[in-house]
Amino acid sequence: MPFGCQSSARLTPRRPLSLAGLAWPRWRASVGRVLSTPWVSQIDLYAGALFVHICLGWNFYLSTILMLAVTALYTIAGGLAAVIYTDALQTLIMVVGAVILTVKAFEQIGGYDQLASAYARAVPSRIISNTTCHMPRADAMHMFRDPYTGDLPWTGMTFGLTVMATWYWCTDQVIVQRSLSARDLNHAKGGSILASYLKMLPMGLIIMPGMISRVLFPDDVGCVVPSECLRACGAEIGCSNIAYPKLVMELMPTGLRGLMIAVMMAALMSSLTSIFNSSSTLFTMDIWKWLRPRARERELLLVGRLVTVVLIGVSVAWIPVLQGSNSGQLFIYMQSVTSSLAPPVTAVFVLGIFWRRANEQGAFWGLMAGLAVGATRLVLEFLHPAPPCGHPEDRPAILHSIHYLHFAVALFVLSGAVVVAGSLLTPAPQGIQIENLTWWTLAQDLPSGAKTGDPRASQKHAFWARVCGFNAILLVCVNVFFYAYFA
C-alpha cells in the first residue's frame, strides 16, 4: 500500500505494473488480467449454480443462467461502492450463520474430540473393490503432510501457496481496487488486518464442518461409484463440493437456512460482479482506449458491457471441463490453475519492489517465459485429467510426479531468473522511473490523512499505525501457533 499511495495509483490504473517499479505499457499487463478472468469467474459461477442446484433442486444449467442474469443486472447497475457495502453486510451475516452451523454440526458428532475418529470411519456404503479411494486420508487432521505422497505436501503448502497468495493479495485487481479505495494508509492497513483475521475463520467454520458433512452423509459427500455420485450431485467424478450446502440444508433451521442461502448466493454474485467489473474496466481503459484514444464515454461504456458478456460466455462454456477436472474438487482446480498462471506475476512484482535494477524488458520476458511454461502444464492437465478411482495412472510424468504446488515454486524461480537475466542484459531504469516505486526509493514522508497540520490528527494517525502494527505481529504469532498445532 505505501507504494500505491506514493505512486498515486488509481482504482482504474493506467499502468497496472507500475507498482512493481516498472514503466509498463498499460495494455500488456491488462491483457493478461482479462484473459485470466474466465479461469477465475467460472469457479464462482459453478459454485453458485451448484449451490442453487443442491438447495433448491433446480436444473444445474438453469441455475447457471439465473446466476448470470442477476449478476449481469448487478454489474451494469452497481459500482465499486455498492460491491463494498454489500460485501461488508454479507460477511457479517455469513460469519454469524457459519458459527451457528458449526456449533450444530459439532453437536451432531459429539464435539471436536470425536471429529478425527468419526471422520476416519466416514466410508460410503458402496465402494469400488480393490481400491482405497473411498477411505478418508489418515493425515486428514494434519496440515504438514508428506512432501512426496501427500495430497497437499507441506513444502508446497509453505512455499507454493505463499507464491500464489502474494499474487492474489498484492496484485489481483479485485483486491487492489478495494485497498486503493481506502481513505488513507492506515485505513488500507486496517482493512488488510481485518481480512487477515477473517481468513483464519475458514479452518473452523468451513473446513471442519465440511469434514463433519462427510461423517453425516458419507454416501453423498464421500461417494466414489459414478452412478452414486451422479445421483447425489449430478457429477460422476465426485461430490465433495456439495459438503457445505448439504450441511446447510440438513442442519440449519428453516429461517436461518433461507437467510444463509440468500447471503451465500449474494456473496457469490458479488464476487462475480467484482471480477467482471474490474476486467471490463481494465480492457476498456487500458486496451480499448489505447487502440482508440479519441473514444467517447458512450463507446467505452458499450465496449465494457460487451466485454462482460464475452467473459460470461467463455466462463459458461468452460463449466463442463471444470466438472471433470481435478476429481471434481473446486479448491484443487482453483489452486492448480493458479499455480500455472500466478508465479510469473509474483516474480515480477517481488523483484520490481525489492530490486531497483529490474526493468521493462526483463519483466516482459519473465512474464512471457513463465506464461509459456505455465500454459503448457495447464493444457496438459486438461488433456490428461486425473484418472477416476480404480483406473491406472497414465498421465505424463510432469503431472503425476510434480505436484502443482511444487510446480508453482519452480515456475516462480524460473520466471524470476528470466527477469534478472533480461534486466541485466538491457539498460537500467532511470531514477525518475522508479521514484517511490521500490523499497529502496520510497520516500519516508508518506502521504496520509495526518498531514493536516493538526497535532491531534498526527497523534491519532500514529496511534492507529501502532494498532495496525501490533495486530500484524499478533496475527503472525497466532498463525504460527495454529500451523504448529495442526502440523
Image: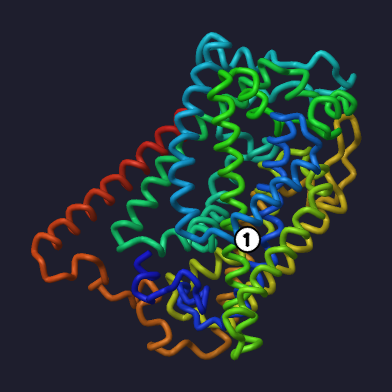
Q: Is residue 241 above or below residue 348?
A: above
Packing grade of label 1 (10 A; few <14, some 14-19, many >=20) is: many
For image coordinates 16% across by 56% down, the residue present is 460
Count of all numbered marks drawn on residues in the image: 1
Task: Give the farthest residue toward the top.
Answer: 110
Which element type, helix, strand or loop, lies under badge 1?
helix
For image coordinates 43% across by 37% down, the residue present is 92
Q: Is residue 476 left or right of residue 467?
A: right
Q: Is residue 384 left or right of residue 173?
A: right
Q: Is residue 235 left or right of residue 245?
A: right
Residue 218 is drawn in which quadrant? Answer: top right
Residue 109 is drawn in which quadrant? Answer: top right
Q: Is residue 354 left or right of residue 267?
A: left
Q: Between 409 and 430, which is closer to the camera in this rendering?
A: 430
The reply to whether residue 82 is in sight is yes
Report x, y in % for residue 260: 56, 31
Residue 1 is drawn in which quadrant? Answer: bottom left
For image coordinates 55% across by 66% down, the residue present is 347
The reply to whether residue 418 is in sight is no
Q: Tell me which colouring the rendered structure shows.
A: rainbow
Q: Is residue 256 above or below residue 173?
A: above
Report x, y in % for residue 479: 41, 38
Report x, y in % for residue 133: 79, 26
Q: Is residue 460 above or below residue 372?
A: above
Q: Amino acid at mark 1?
A: Phe
Task: Give the farthest residue toward the left.
Answer: 455
Q: Between 430 and 284, which is closer to the camera in this rendering?
A: 284
Residue topped by disc 1 = 276
For image coordinates 70% across by 16% down, the residue present is 122
